[in-house]
Amino acid sequence: MTDALAIRGLSKTFGGKVAVDNLSLNVRAGELYALLGPNGAGKTTTLRMVAGLLKPNSGEISVFGHDVLTDPAGAKQIIAWAPDEPMLYDRLTPMEYLEFVAGLWGVEAAVAAPKAEELLRWLGLWDNRGEPCEGFSRGMKQKTALAGALIHDPQLLILDEPLTGLDAAVARQVKDLLQARVKAGATVILTTHILEVAERMADRIGIIQNGRLVADGTLDELRTRSGEGKATLEDLFLELTGTGETAEGVSPEGIQA
Amino acid sequence: MIAPAGSTLWLMRHELRLFWRGMARRRGGGRMRRIWLTIALPLILMVAAGLPLGFALRRIHQIPPTPAVGLISTAVLVALFTLMLSQTLGAAITALYERADLDLLFSSPLAPRRVLAVRFLAVSVNVFSIFAMILTPILLPIAVMGHPTWLAALVVLFAVALAASGAGLLLAAALFRLIGPRRTRTVGQVLAAVIGAAFFLTAQARNILGGAKTASVWAVVLETALNPRFRGIPGLSWPIRAMVGEPLPLLATVGVGGGVFLIANQLLGARFAADAAAAAGAGVGSSGRRARTGGRTRFSASAFNATLLKELRLIARDPALIAQVLLRVLYFVPVGFIVLRSAGQGQSFALPGSAAALALITGQIAGSLAWITVSAEDAPDLLSCAPTPTRTLRQAKIAAAALPVAILLVPVIVPLLWLSPLTSIAAALGSAASIAMAAMMNIWWQRPGKRSDFRRRRQSSWLVAVAELMLGLVIAIATGLAAAGLFGWALIPALLALAGVLMLRRTDAQIAQALRTAS
């Protein structure tokens, strides 16, 4: 079976600083894959290269058999990318935004119009469909962007920190939507700092640090490999990335007012 | 003296600091520009105008307050008032909508009314400072060479600034009441632009309205002033008498300016604070524009159509952009009238010049819009991760920039086809070339920025800005020569423009590399 995403020997440097270092990674079709890592580990850079927004220095990226570097249009046609900062136009309404995004992906009007209505209703934005996005809360903007990402029914949905800044109700809606997409056969890759979300939702988890994949597998596989049978994902994450230690001589009590 | 935190003076210092920093950011240009503005320009004004005037006036003890002098000085003050009103109205609209810090100030224990009064006083001081920077180097030598009381002109200038600030506040509040928070934003900025161009428009009244009896307002003022039978209007000499330091007129002028400011603040201060709060909520949820439940959607599988529609919508909904572009359109209107009237009256001498001006102005407007559509893209990543070819997106963006200009051009070009076919064809071709040149320059030399950076768009590359202007001028010359029937001569600037455009051409790879470097 073709992998949804296959990355081989991917490297990217910015002015001499290595962001992604010879990374290889596979995501299977129909799974929800969580890519975790500390700040600056190279998660977003990796996903931006997968989405065709950055060119790697070396390596190969294949999305459902489409080489992102040699066949970018073919790959982009089946990918949706939703960054942590929603890519919106403040002066367009959600419906107009969806009209635009559907046009970019060449979705026929007869398919796009009911799909837009379905998404906006599902995300609770139907009553706001005629209002410009500039007055929206962060959650509403995030949901509008998510609707845009789903309007062309992508096979691979890539989300960078999709739950950042969302209240509990909106976060629940987004999580439900992602699980529904996976159930419908789509593949979802997400990055998150909320480890409980990855622990509860992800089929497989990848942990990246200094641009390298340091662990990859189901939660049970990660536990087995670390020899900690009952460890939480947080314990594993801190152990694998070595980010558990606090700065020398500083304790939480010490910084209390 | 350090003003205590929270005092009016302290708040004033905060407002002035924000204004001058914002001004420096908008103007940009670095050290050389600052030296030019603070040292070179005042020196030039002093040497070129202040010293000769001071020398010429040193033996005149008093300006005779004749009706002519009174009329001219009053007209100049009225013109100054309109220029200042344009800025104060813009500031009032900004205070209502672009108010990142107003929420902070309103949430503090300071009274909202005081916050707004200080803000508008700061607007008056700022507007006054801009004009005082020009007037002071001229006034100083005159004052030193025997007319120290003439420095009172600066006091009059401040009184006018206060009146303009009060009037700006009144106008903004009236618009808010009459047309609501949403429309006020657009209409207010457009109105500010129109008021700012009033000086130019009144000077062009003859061209716009036509008819033998219509003349420039300034010509009428001069004609009336020089008419020996003009006996003046009571009170008309007060402004000039105030400017040269006569106590009573000076006191009266300050009283009027300060009075307008105080009354506006007293009457509308509290209401304006409420309006500001309402404007903040206008964009949100149910208090905003109601959902168009039965609205027709415009889905299209064509990326070109979708992008074109999106760009046109964004242009139409950007009040600051509309106000900026409108200024250029206002300069377009008299030229359009000149060309049509000249063709209608068989005055062939004015036609080539007007055709050239049309080509130049359309290129300028198209260039401004092309910067917005091409460089000021709000969601570049969205376009980059779409499967649509870059070429299609560019074509749609350029079409969106050219379409409004074409709509503007049609009412001039089509009637002209009957009145003077040669001028019509030359103007149409020249404008098309000018628009195409502006579009290509904006694609080849993309300068990514925010929409709010519109006024500073040329500063990212002076060379390209100058090249764009020069090429526009050369195309305009070719258009004028072609309209005059001098086709052979027209070929020379046309080929020159073509060579210039080809020299500045960039390949897709070069554009991509430049964009990568810029980001």
Image (spheres, coloured by chain):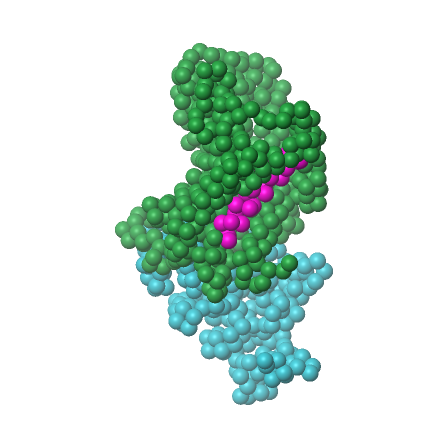
Residue B337 locus on image (x, y percent): 44, 22
Q: Residue at x 61, y 15 (%)?
A: B489
Q: Quadrant of residue A150?
A: bottom left
From this view, report whether residue A245 is shown above or below residue B519. below
Residue nearest the viewer, comparing A26 with B473: B473
The colour of chain A is cyan
Q: Quadrant of residue A59?
A: bottom right
Q: Is residue B304 magenta?
A: no
Residue nearest the viewer, comparing B124 with B231: B231
Residue B405 locus on image (x, y percent): 46, 32
In the displayed structure image, the side of residue A43 where residue A32 appears, left or right: left
The colour of chain B is green
Residue B403 appears in the picture as rendered: no
> What span is in magenta?
B118-141
Residue B8 locus on image (x, y percent): 53, 57
Q: Residue at x 58, y 87 (%)?
A: A228
Residue nearest the viewer, comparing B82 with B486: B82
In the displayed structure image, the side of residue B376 where residue B55 appears, left or right: right
From this view, report whether residue B115 is shown above or below residue B404. below
Q: Quadrant of residue A11?
A: bottom right
Q: Residue at x 67, y 79 (%)?
A: A247
Q: Residue at x 43, y 50 (%)?
A: B265
Dominant secondary structure of the residues highlighted in magenta in the image: helix
